[in-house]
Amino acid sequence: MTPIQKKMFADLADKTLFEKAQSLGFDYLNKALERNIYPTAEALDNLSVFEEKLPEKTGDAHEVLDKLNEFGSPATVAQVGGRYFGFVNGSVVPAGLAAKNLSIFWDQNTAMQVISPISSKLESVVQNWLVELFGLPKSTVAGFVSGTSMANFCGLAAARYRILMNQGWDLTEKGLFNAPKIRVVTGKHAHSTILKVVSLLGLGKANIEWVDVDGQGRILVEEMPELDNRTILVLQAGNVNSGSFDDFEAICQKAQEKGAWIHIDGAFGLWAGATQSLKHLTKDFEYANSWAVDGHKTLNTPYDSGIILCNDKEALVASLHMTGGYIIIGKERDGMYFTPEMSRRARIIELWATLRYLGREGIDQMIEGIHQRAVQFAQLFEQIDGFKVLNEVVFNQVIVQCATDELTEAVIHEIQELRECWVGGSTWHGRKIIRVSVCSWATTAEDVERSVASFEEALRRVLTTKFT
Ligand SMILES: *Cc1c(COP(=O)(O)O)cnc(C)c1O
């Protein structure tokens, strides 16, 4: 036995090491609800302790863990709590987090059934649950990827394959050189990841046919170009600023009749389709061909978790497929056929646990609750001088603005300094805005009140110091 083996066998048998990790994590989680949302200046300064040379000698596992806890933990953003409203980042459902904790010890690779039967089984089960939950065509399959960036990639890769195959052009063999042209039609407010994907897939950003949008960021249906069977139409369930949804009812069925491939980017908004009270927002979205959605946003699974849903299994598998002599085709699901990666961590476990725990009722209540807190934000802002809400709060997003762009920016900065809550900025129709994204199950009515009070305090400070 080598010395390092001896040392690691001892670590493996050291229950106190793993118990410490669990216990520190548990304490963190509970304090995170009350802690400063963003790291203090001191915590950020202390990050310099990590700027060390790679050690020559093997260290001590406890020492590694202690260092991470002492300096890493205070430099985290407390997004698992109820007052983080930045970037549409979700919190974690405790049951999902606990399941992830167990599965960390399993360290499964979900590439093939033979490598991880449990992951294969859970992927099959969750695929069926999601198809039923969203009311998608029975033929829909799911791939479990890192996030919606990758899910958008998979959806458009399948679209690209299918459109060319329909014209007798096998993309996987012949590539894009000299291939028939593919059109991409999308709204001017498409998420930036759509641009990235169009670029990655060689479709060319300059070829995108942009459709004008209304004041909420929704595609203007009457401005849509003529669609055909060479077109990928990318729609949106949840505008990243306003939370608005494209009018699927007016668009999807007609686009399908024209033979276009419809892809819906529903990173956080697709979950409206899993509720009773908000599913009107996604009416007729089932006429699309592919849907991208995150677990780690509205559903509050741990990071990272994204899902591609596609009603054309052949196109999805053919465009992501790989082969090799050593690959053993399982009797059941081999996850790698549905994703670009071969080896993948078993994020399906947390996703399964989250869905299994919440059930339809829990999903409905959690998402409706998130919506209600966003509505509460808007109502409180309406009562305060100095803040104006610019969007219809249809889902979880609230766009707020101060009198001038300069003031808006200064207030964002001050809110971040106060650390009671965290919000970021964005631009909306050419103006600076504060973007409030309610995305945590843990946000209570009191959290919203506290946060709005912090907005008021920030505005007061800015007005009395900088703007007088
Ligand atoms: C967050 C988001 C994405 C990107 O998703 P990731 O999970 O961060 O990869 C794409 N589209 C929309 C609308 C989003 O909100």
Image (cartoon, rainbow, N blue to C red):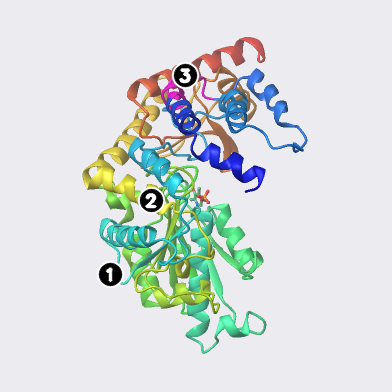
Toward the front, the furthest residue is 1
Amino acid identity at mark 2: Ile
Is residue 33 rendered magenta in the image?
Answer: yes
Q: Nearer the viewer, mark 1 or mark 3?
A: 1
Q: Earlier in the sequence, mark 3 or mark 2?
A: 2
| Residue 230 seen in the current view | no
Give the quarter of the image for residue 367: top left
**Coordinates of residue 235 in the picture (x, y in percent):** 45, 60
Distance, label 1 to label 2, CA atoms, is 23 Å
Q: Earlier in the sequence, mark 1 or mark 2?
A: 1
Q: Is residue 103 left or right of residue 171?
A: left
Q: Which residue is mark 1?
A: 138
| Residue 33 seen in the current view | yes
**Coordinates of residue 71 in the picture (x, y in percent):** 62, 25
Determine the secondary structure under disc 2.
helix
- The quarter of the rendered structure image containing the C terminus is top right
Q: Residues within 10 Å of mark 2 (few under 14, many from 20)?
A: many
Determine the secondary structure under disc 1.
loop
Q: Which residue is mark 2?
A: 349
**Coordinates of residue 144 in the picture (x, y in percent):** 44, 58
Determine the secondary structure under disc 3.
loop
Q: Nearer the viewer, mark 1 or mark 2?
A: 2
Q: Residues within 10 Å of mark 3 (few under 14, many from 20)?
A: few
Amino acid identity at mark 3: Asp
Is residue 427 rendered magenta in the image?
Answer: no
**Coordinates of residue 434 in the picture (x, y in percent):** 53, 32
Amino acid identity at mark 1: Lys
Toward the bottom, the furthest residue is 168
Q: Which residues are magenta?
A: 27-37
In this rendering, the answer to whether 78 lies above or below 271 is: above
Q: Earlier in the sequence, mark 1 or mark 3?
A: 1
